Amino acid sequence: MPHSPLDDAALDQLFRAARTFASTHDTWLDRPVSTDQIEQIWALARLGPTQTNTVPARVAWVVSAEAKARLIPLMDEGNRDKTLTAPVTAIIGADLDFHEKLPYLYPHADARAWFEGAPEQAALLTAWRNSSLQGAYLILAARALGLDCGPMSGFDADKVTAEFFPGTRIRANFMCNIGYGNRASLRPRNPRLPFDEACRIL
C-alpha cells in the first residue's frame, strides 16, 4: 500500500510553521535538551538516504559548558551569543574515510574498493555532499521531535576541525544549534522563490 500524505499539522511542524533560529536576534528558551532526545535525533536522521549508504556524517554534540568554552572563540562574532545560549550545538562533520565503514554499511558489494585510494578531492566531494544531506535530515528529525534548529556557517572551519575532530580525516561542514526557540524574538519569515522561478518540468 502506498503511504498516505502527512496531515497539515505534521507539514506545519516540519516545514510551513518551522522557523530557523539562526539570525543574530534570535534567542533560545532556558529549557534543556536531553541526551535521550539527542540520540533520538540521530536514530531518525541516520535513516535518510546517502550515496551507496556511505553515511559520512560524524556529529560532535556540544552540550557542556567546557565544550561550549572551546567552541565559542572559534565562531564568528555574530554567532557567539546564540550558540552560547543554545542547549545543544551539533557540529556536522564529513568523514573522508567514510569508505572504511562500507563493508558494514553496504555488505552486498565490495563498495569500499570503489572509493579506496581515490584522490582526497573525490573523497571530500562525496563526503561533503552526503554529510550535507545528513545534516538536513538531522534538522528535520529535530523538528519532528518538537525542537527548533539554527543551522549556520560562520566559524573557523580549520580550527573547529582541529579542536573537535583531532587526529581524524573528519572535516567540519556546518553547525546547527538545537533547542526550544523563543518565537517572540522572530521577525516575519523571509520570502522563498515560487515554483516558476526555481523549477522546470522537462
Image: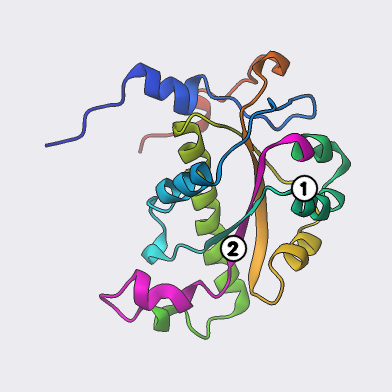
Q: Which residues are magenta?
A: 84-111
Give the residue type at disc 1. Answer: Ala
**Quick one: SS at disc 1?**
helix
Report which residue position mark 1 lands on: 65
Vertically, is 12 above or below 159? above
> Which residue: 35% across, 74% down?
104
Vertically, is 52 above or below 33? below
Asked which quadrant contains residue 10, the reply is top left
Report which residue position mark 2 lands on: 94
Specify whether 77 is left or right of 139: right
> Which residue: 76% across, 35% down?
85
Does the segment drawn in magenta span residue 88? yes
Q: Nearer the viewer, residue 128 or 177?
A: 177
Quarter of the image with the C terminus in it? top left
Query: Which label belongs to residue 36?
Result: none
Count neighbours of disc 2 (C-alpha within 10 A) and say few if under 14, some if 14 to 19, many if 20 or more: many
Give the residue type at disc 2. Answer: Ala
Q: Residue 51: horizontal and vertical position, in percent? A: 41, 62
Does the segment drawn in magenta span residue 94? yes
Q: Residue 40: horizontal and vertical position, in percent? A: 45, 45
Q: Can the viewer see residue 127?
A: yes
Specify whether 48 is left or right of 73: left
Q: Residue 184: horizontal and vertical position, in percent? A: 69, 13
- The mark nearer the N terminus, 1 or 2, is 1
Q: Can the viewer see residue 195?
A: no
